[in-house]
Amino acid sequence: MDQILLEYLSLISALQEQWKQISTNLGGGFFQLAHAKYTMGPHRLNQNQYDGRMQATTRVLISQKKDTNMLNTPNEFICQYTLTSLEEISDNNEDNDSSSLRRRGIKNPENDSTKKRSQGRIIDDPLRWFGILVPSSLRESQRHFKQSLSGMINIINLRNEIINKEAEYQMLKKEKEKFMEENRMKHANSAEN
Amino acid sequence: MNAISTYKDRNFIAVIGDEDSVTGLLLAGVGHVDGANKNFLVVDSKTPLSKIEETFIEFTKRKDIAIILINQHIAEYIRQLVDDYDQAFPTILEIPSKDHPYDPEKDSVLKRVQHLFGE
């Protein structure tokens, strides 16, 4: 029980550390964004410049992680979020395609052509929405925001772990109370006898 | 198996925030537009509260969103909705914004911790 409490506390300090990092990163991102706004002029960098056909290039995958250290938790699995890119997702699909092709031993021309098309497609960088020659501060800002985003994913994972640990702790606490109660009853009975 | 199908299609990150936060996160590549469906909302002083509420509810109901990022100060406007939300997916994370830095007092996890230790 003490160990769980210790793990719980270390998770919390990790969470606080992560928040601190995100705050710095976001702060840097906002600063660079403000600088880019200053150099590009206020009307070149606002929501009207967003590309209406944008496709998410940064995505998340949710997977379940089984924690073997857990004794008896209400939910055995912790959801694990991982940051991934559009390319990885389509790569995975392509892998599946090619393995099924190999199994069959027949080349499907239709599948081949879709593969080529997806490889040939250039994945749009959101930086392009704001022009071809963007100031370096905007690039810098993008880097900061990407870092903060992965920090946010870490926070979500930590948060899930903390909530799970808490449930584990509460359960052990209840067990302990039950055990103590039983002990007290036993003592009371033996004292009566 | 059913549980797996509920989350494997969720891979977008939705954002509700002020213009700078949304621009920054879109630069990081989270934005996705599919016809009339967008996965972000820019909130400014002219955005009506009902619009924020509607968008928040819409995002929580969508089956392709894994995470909703919302600026902490905007979450304050719809505090009741955010606090009452108890689905496993999508997950909500309140993030700081340019004018409103991260406030640990309002962090839901740290609130739970305080509660656990009876403070």
Image: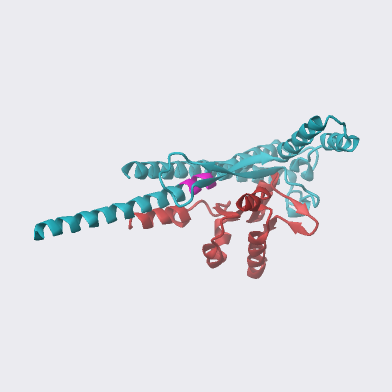
Chain colours: A cyan, B red
- Magenta residues, as a range? A155-161
Q: What is the count of numbered marks? A: 0
Q: Residue at x 67, y 38 (%)?
A: A137
In front of the other: B38 or A118: A118
Q: Residue at x 69, y 43 (%)?
A: A58
- Taking A97 as reference, is B76 above or below it? below
Residue B5 screen position, x and y as percent: 65, 51
- Judge by depth and name the residue closer to the eye, A191 or B112: A191
Along the line of sight, which residue is nearer the eye, B94 or A117? A117
The single residue placed furthest to the right in the displayed view is: A109
* Image x and y of residue A103, in percent: 79, 31
Q: At 31% across and 43% down in the image, what residue appears?
A: A2
Quadrant hosting residue B114: bottom left
Left or right of residue A68: residue B22: right
In the rendered image, the quadrant that contains the N terminus of chain A is top left
Residue A158 among magenta residues = yes
B63 on left or right of A4: right
Q: Look at the image and tell me whether residue A80 can be seen.
A: yes
Q: Main secondary structure of the magenta part?
A: helix
Is residue A163 rendered to the left or right of residue B118?
right
Q: Nearer the viewer, residue B37 or A135?
A: B37
Q: Is residue A124 above or below residue B98?
A: above
Magenta region includes residue B80: no
Quarter of the figure with residue A26: top right
Q: Residue furthest front?
A: A193
Quadrant position of the C terminus of chain A in the picture: bottom left
Q: Position of residue A59 (x, y in %)?
A: 67, 44
Whether residue A28 can be seen here = no
Left or right relative to A134: residue A15: left
Q: Residue at 73% x, 46% y: name it.
A: A56
